[in-house]
Amino acid sequence: MAIPVETFFLDPSEQGTLQARIQRMVAEGILSGRFRRGEKLPSSRKLAQHLGVSRITVTAAYTELVASDYLAARGRSGFYVSEGAPEPPPLPTRRPDADRVDWARALGQRFTGGATPEKPAGWAQARYPFIYGQADPTLFDHANWRLCAVKALGQKDFASMTADQFDRDDPELVSVIARHILPRRGINARPSEILVTMGAQNALWLTAQVLLTQRRRAAIENPSYYSLRDILSQSRCHLAAVDLDEDGMPPEAIPDGTDAIFVTPSHQAPTTVTMPLARRRALLERARTLEALIVEDDYEFEMSFLQAPSPALKSLDPDGRVIYVGSFSKSLFPGLRLGYLVGSEPFIREARALRASVLRHPPGLIQRTVAHYLSLGHYQALIRRMGRSLGERRKVMEEAIRAEGLEIAGKPYFGGSAFWMKAPEGTDTDALAQRLLPQGVVIEPGAPFFAAPEGPCRYYRLAYSSIPADRIAAGVKLIAEAM
């Protein structure tokens, strides 16, 4: 296909002949990267009609660009961007006008500068990527996912894929979540109590926006998921960071006046601690006393391959005060961006209205593809396959950690996909991570998980979801040597 003729226009303020201006327009398009080598230019007739000039003028401009090797003429086919288009540019590209806006004054709110760290560039190509929460292409079921996507594109599913369903979600996906996913966690929910979201993070944002104000207080775990802290800070609520013990968040440490409690009881983020049943009941009782709501982020419950998972906090809740957050991002792949909220109808109704005002609804094609993938049993097969592989990798990593004398800080009793580690006193794991990068080793420093601006520097996370089992021991050895 030719480059669309609509992308070409002549700036009326430019000086020079029409032929020179057309030459400059095409050359700048090539030098700016908008027109790439091998792409076909519009015919001289079409471009002349579009610009309102004579065809001879356009042909002459093209001919000059061929002479300078910006374009190449191919027989009766037309003109193409030359494979030898010159770099660096002999003609200076047009520079934009200076920005005269005082952005320090114009910005009403700021969302940069949060706790969320950036992953090192090119981490996926590293030999030893101990990075959490990323998909392993060797474990994913590409063939069946493709079949489900094709099925969702069929005529039978056309309405579900294309409709603007801002006031509801894909009924097949909601049905599968209600009948197959939630019962595994001991949760019974009606469709009106389920909302599909753009991943767990979107679910947490919706929840914070609906529940919290500047006058309300939220309690979070310390350490905790750093993006949740950013979300709660943006809501401008009062934030209380509750230090964890060996069983997770101590209920008695939650301050009076708390309105919402955010917890990750199945696999605490980042320590991987699983909250015992007695502690879960005590947390529910504390919330009842405070008349507070609990937001349960049940991420990674599928990765309980060491023993059967504990019941979800929501399954123990007789009052309807637990709001449950689930996600397919870890069990399928992060780029899917599909999760769900489960809560009482008044809450889901408000969350749905907020979602509609911001992004309408998650794409219908994605919802229906996931619905097919779940209903046809591919999801359960994937979870079993991932559990076997992660169980093997965890065993290899645990042995390597023990052999190298490294210290595990968190106790993943049920599985998961990472170890929470503690380095010797005085170790700065951020500096350690930088030293390891040239050796192809990528680890996650632990300081961003803590509420204090200068969090403890000796903690770090080692994940085994993105690294093959046969590379784990060598990577752990390099970590120990660098430490």
Image (cartoon, grey):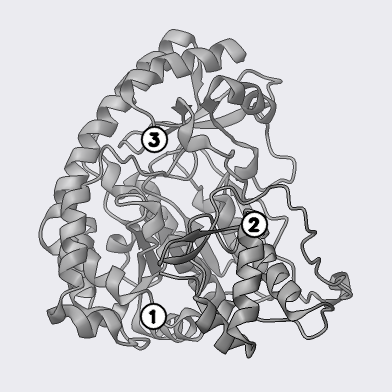
Numbered disc 3: secondary structure: loop
Q: In this view of the protein, which residue sits in the foreground, 241 or 430?
A: 430
x%, y% of residue 273? 42, 39
Q: Residue at x 65, y 38 (%)?
A: 447
Query: Compared with residue 314, is residue 137 higher up or lower down, i.e. above or below?
Result: above
Q: Nearer the viewer, mark 2 or mark 1?
A: 2
Look at discs 2 and 3 and give the one toward the viewer: 2
Horizontal side, residue 84 vs residue 327: left or right: right
Secondary structure category for the residue under label 2 = helix
Q: Position of residue 271 (x, y in %)?
A: 48, 38
Please name the amino acid that badge 2 sits on: Ala
Identify which residue is drawn at 56% across, 70% down: 259
Dot 2 or dot 3: first in sequence order is: 2
Task: Please rate how many residues cluster around mark 2, counting C-alpha atoms within 10 Å: few if below 14, some from 14 to 19, many from 20.
Answer: few
Point 35% across, 74% down: residue: 363
Q: For residue 466, which numbered disc appears in the image?
A: 3
Picture layout, residue 279 above or below residue 208: above
Question: What amino acid is at disc 3?
Answer: Ser
Q: In the rendered image, which residue does mark 2 sit on?
A: 67
